Amino acid sequence: MTDTIFKPGLEGVIAGETTVAAVEQSSLAYRGYNISDLAQNTTFEEVAHLLLYNELPTSAQLAEFQTVLAQLRPLPAEVIQMIRLIPTEVPMMDVLRSAVSFAGHFDPVKGDSPDDLRRRAVWLMAVCAGVVSARYRLLSKKEPVDPKPGLSHAAQILYQALGEVPDETSVRLLDLTLTLYAEHEYNASTFACRIVASTMSDLVSGIVTGIGTLKGPLHGGANEAAMAMLKQFDSAEEASEWIQNAFEKKQKVMGFGHRVYKNGDHRAHILEDELRNLAEQKGQQKWMAIYDAIKEPMVTQKKIFPNVDYPCGLTYYLLGLPIDMYTPLFVCSRVTGWSAHFIEQAENNRLIRPLSRYVGSSAREVVPVDKR
Ligand SMILES: CC(C)(COP(=O)(O)OP(=O)(O)OC[C@H]1O[C@@H](n2cnc3c(N)ncnc32)[C@H](O)[C@@H]1OP(=O)(O)O)[C@@H](O)C(=O)NCCC(=O)NCCS
């Protein structure tokens, strides 16, 4: 084994091929469609179809996709019962991880053909959304509500969480974040899912692995961590003071930096424009001032740019959603990208099993336990 192929964190290493998405310095595309184009011209359901079925749907295909999703939406009563048993202080990401695993025992889709896997992926979209909404309801001391026919996926999540049909702005912005979060090539959680697929394990196990991996603050957990940081401040001045202190302490600032994008994350640009409008519309410019007080020095002094989690945290906050729900909402979206990669890996599989470089003690002999 040569040292030349060892890269800590696999940085810069091409670990496989994919047709699902391309992530480059200056662009992100899902199956060839630029993310800005998708963000402007499609809904999340169209993006989900693109990822799972390789093409944007025709009107008829979209209607069929929405019908199947609606049929698969009601959660088994056992899953709701299980969520009730989890202590209220448990983070929603942990609840989601456990509930998806448990729901797997009630999988309505039989078989393991690529089409069965696609249908199971649509069911998992429904499960993730249903669990997040039901948990929100139960934490609010209210009973879960049944799905409402005719709502988009984003509207359904909000409706089942809040118990009332959400306003247009909230739906549009949640839909946009679902589109921006849906897929990102060989990121940590997707790679973890592909490893699960490569052992010929099952899709539910892959998604549970993805959830566990996404949870960390260096990955999807950053949207919650970024908002928790912003919430400490009452003014832009306080934020300015804090960031200079963070520089001195060489502290990581959540929602900034990226392994691939070193000159900015275009998903963050797309969302930040919408966030500015939202803050103005809600008369919450104070939050944008705090947001900018952190962002400006990060960009000008450190040349480290916001990633999509930075504007997303504040967007969800201004939509009135609890911080604990942000990374679970990311899951509601990324379950599509994970599934697309799982299916791609399963269809053209080779076990993923890299090597390590041993840096432990040199060869030694066992001394019997009574002589150690
Ligand atoms: C995402 C992340 C893990 C990428 O890390 P990476 O590719 O390994 O980059 P590195 O950690 O090697 O960073 C390179 C330099 O930039 C600094 N840096 C990177 N992100 C930073 C951040 N968010 N805050 C402060 N400094 C940061 C590092 O400290 C390092 O500085 P050094 O060379 O003086 O040691 C990292 O940027 C990070 O931890 N960001 C915060 C968490 C986050 O927002 N995650 C969501 C990603 S979408």
Image (spheres, rainbow, N blue to C red):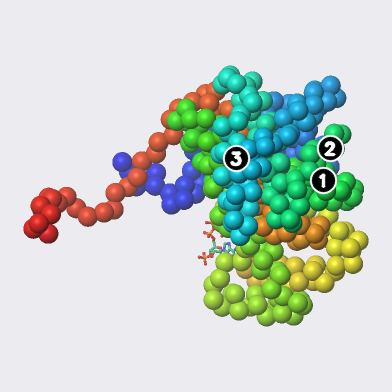
Q: Position of residue 116 (x, y in %)?
A: 62, 22
Q: Position of residue 330 (x, y in %)?
A: 67, 48
Q: Earlier in the sequence, mark 2 or mark 3?
A: 3
- Eyeballing the image, is 305 above or below 109? below
Q: Is mark 1 within 8 Å of ligand 1?
A: no
Q: Position of residue 10 (x, y in %)?
A: 47, 47
Q: Is residue 342 visible?
A: no
Pointers 1 and 3 in contact (C-beta within 8 Å): no
Circle 2 residue: 148
- Eyeballing the image, is 21 above or below 62? below
- Using the numbered discs, state the Cα–Cα distance from disc 1 to disc 2 in whole angstroms: 8 Å
Give amino acid for label 3: Val
Q: Position of residue 288 (x, y in %)?
A: 80, 67
Q: Is residue 134 visible?
A: yes
Mark carried by residue 236: none
Give amino acid for label 1: Tyr
Circle 1 residue: 159
Circle 3 residue: 100
Give amino acid for label 2: Lys
Q: Is mark 3 within 8 Å of ligand 1?
A: no
Q: Secondary structure at mark 3?
A: helix
* Residue drawn at the location 56% of the way across and 71% of the way down: 251
* Mark 1 crowdedness (10 Å alpha carbons): few <14, some 14-19, many ≥20: many
